[in-house]
Amino acid sequence: MRDMHEGITVVLKAEHLGSVLGFPITNSLLMAWAVMLLIIGAAYFFGRSLTLVPGKFQAAIEWAFEGAIAYMTEVLGSERLARRFFPLVASIFIFIAVINELEFFPGVGSIGLVHAAEFLPVLRAPTTDLNFTLALAMISFFTIEVTGIATLGFFKYAGKYVNLKSPIGFTVGLIELVSNLGRLISFSFRLFGNIFAGEVMVLVAGYFLPYFLPAPLMGFEMFIGLIQALVFAMLTLFFIKLAIMDPHEAH
Amino acid sequence: MQQLLSAFGIDWRLLIAQAVNFALVLVALWYFLYKPVLAMMARRQELIAKGVVAAQEAEEKLAHTDTAVMERLQAAETEADTIVAHARESAQSEKARLLKEAEARAAAVAADAEARASEVASRARRESERDIARLSILAAEKILKEKYD
């Protein structure tokens, strides 16, 4: 995305910066690595600084963990399950949230290379790259399906989707199957669309009213970024719940 | 489809790379963040539970010692009471004894004084009787002398 004198250019896909050993390197991949470094580094130093009598920051983190596990226990109906899925759900939230909050950080999207008269930003929020959102959607999807199969057994779980007892049951099962597969698309495009649209909106606002409009919109988009991270994590949680529910108790 | 994929820049290698990225974040956070934080919370909970139990025990112990102290205090009080009563009793009997002794001594002194007084009186009488006899003899001598002279 670039705002040049001739107008606004919106690039749907992450820009290629080059390749290493035939492996493509895009700006969203670079940013993903940078955010990973940040998150893992912060987690490492925070994890080492834990004390039995917590400081304010540690207390806040612990409060969040406790609240999340309590909520997940309520949803999944078992603390054991909540503790098992907490790392996945929390990591989805943290990774997406940090990326979205850094989306408008100075330098992201504005520092770049000029290659063949084309401006290539070095960093691009991975949540505005479908590769990233689709990868997360796939991880979420497979976790949900594998959990369903592991909890209910293959045949019982498959029975949710392939029901030969009655025509209505068969149709319902088919619809369930399609909507289940559709999650891959809804998961990935919801996140991608929301964040990408936010960036485009800020860009357009900057074109119309350069000095005043973008800042409040950026604040709003950062809020949206948090919400989208929460939505992704919560939907994963709810679909896990749906997957482990016994088909006869589901309705 | 191919067009759609290329429009969004979908590349299976990038897909896998991003999935691996997320997996790395998940594992790292698990190891560096969730495990230690949850372990710390569990440890604190355990400590608090232990502390509560210890506090309860201490309270019970305190109550026990309180009653023990009270019992001891009561025992000491009754003992002190009996000791004081004993002392008072013995003091009373000692006083009575001393009084009796003093009375007896006073009586003895009085008797002694009386005896001595009566002895002095009788001696005085004896002496005056002797004086009277001597005086009467002298008077008789004098009268006789005058008669015969």
Image: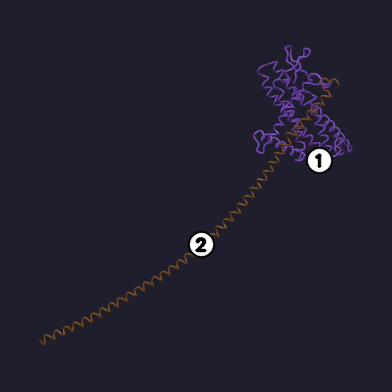
In this image, B20 relative to B112: left or right?
A: right
In this image, A7 relative to B82: left or right?
A: right
Label 1: how many Cα within 10 Å (few below 14, some 14–19, many 20+) = few
The front one of B134 and B64 is B134
Q: Are marks 1 and 2 on the same chain?
A: no
Mark in front: 1 vs 2: 2
| Chain identifier, purple in the render | A
Q: Quadrant of residue A196?
A: top right
Kindly report the distance in space between the C-alpha atoms of the residues bearing marks 1 and 2: 80 Å
Q: Amino acid at mark 2?
A: Asp
Label 2: how many Cα within 10 Å (few below 14, some 14–19, many 20+) = few
Q: Chain of mark 2?
A: B
User: Do we see residue A45 in this rendering?
Assistant: yes
Q: Is residue B49 above or below residue A194?
A: below
Residue B58, given in percent of the width and then of the height, sits at 63, 49
Q: Are marks 1 and 2 in contact (CB under 8 Å)?
A: no
**Which quarter of the rendering shows the C terminus of chain A?**
top right
Q: Is residue B44 above or below residue B64?
A: above
The front one of A2 and A49 is A49
Q: Residue at x 69, y 15 (%)?
A: A208
Residue B46, given in percent of the width and then of the height, sits at 69, 43
What element does badge 2 sit on? helix
Q: Residue at x 15, y 85 (%)?
A: B141
Q: Amino acid at mark 1?
A: Glu
Outermost residue toward the right in this view: A164
Q: Is residue B113 above or below residue A193?
A: below
Which residue carries the number 1 mark? Answer: A249
What element does badge 1 sit on? loop
Which residue carries the number 2 mark? Answer: B81
Residue A84, given in percent of the width and then of the height, sits at 77, 38
User: Do we see residue B4 in this rendering?
Assistant: no
Chain B pictured colour: brown
